[in-house]
Image: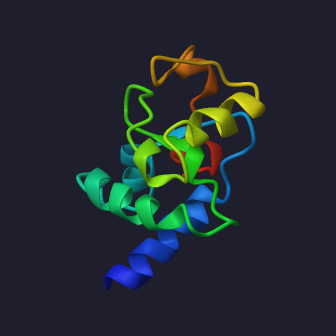
Amino acid sequence: MDKESFFKDVYEVAKLIPEGRVTSYGAIANYLGVKRSARVVGWAMNGAVAQHDVPAHRVVNRIGVLTGKHHFQSPNRMKELLEAEGIKVKDDQIQGFEKHFWDPMIELGL
């Protein structure tokens, strides 16, 4: 699979994350069958920030930290978008992460 095709697959999964829910780079990688490729998913999401139809703010690291926040228009934009969806963020970490976590392997039926 080439990079462009993989990034497109990552974006398609990210588009399915419901409002008020989040997932991790690793969960997307696992769903796509490349379990050890969380960093590559992260690189894909860095580019997704410029695409208005991909909710890049809903993808965080495995413990709910907003590691991608520096790729948004402002350092607080990711937090603002999540809080607008009812997700509380404190010190760049999602509060109640497990409650908001969306696992594509479960939610998409694989």
Closer to us: 39 or 93: 93
- The mark total stands at 0
Residue 62, picture quadrant: top left
Residue 40, picture quadrant: bottom left
> 33 above or below 82?
below
Picture colour scheme: rainbow
- State the image coordinates of residue 14 (x, y, percent, origin top left): 58, 57
- State the image coordinates of residue 41 (x, y, percent, origin top left): 37, 59
Task: For residue 62, say whether it is visible.
Answer: yes
Picture residue at 56% right of the left edge, 67% below the top: 50
Closer to us: 96 or 108: 96
> 43 above or below 57?
below
Q: Is residue 42 left or right of residue 92?
A: left
Q: Is residue 40 left or right of residue 31?
A: left
Picture residue at 42% right of the left edge, 60% below the top: 46
Task: For residue 1, say whether it is visible.
Answer: no
> 3 above or below 78?
below
- State the image coordinates of residue 22 (x, y, percent, origin top left): 58, 37
- State the image coordinates of residue 98 (x, y, percent, origin top left): 54, 20
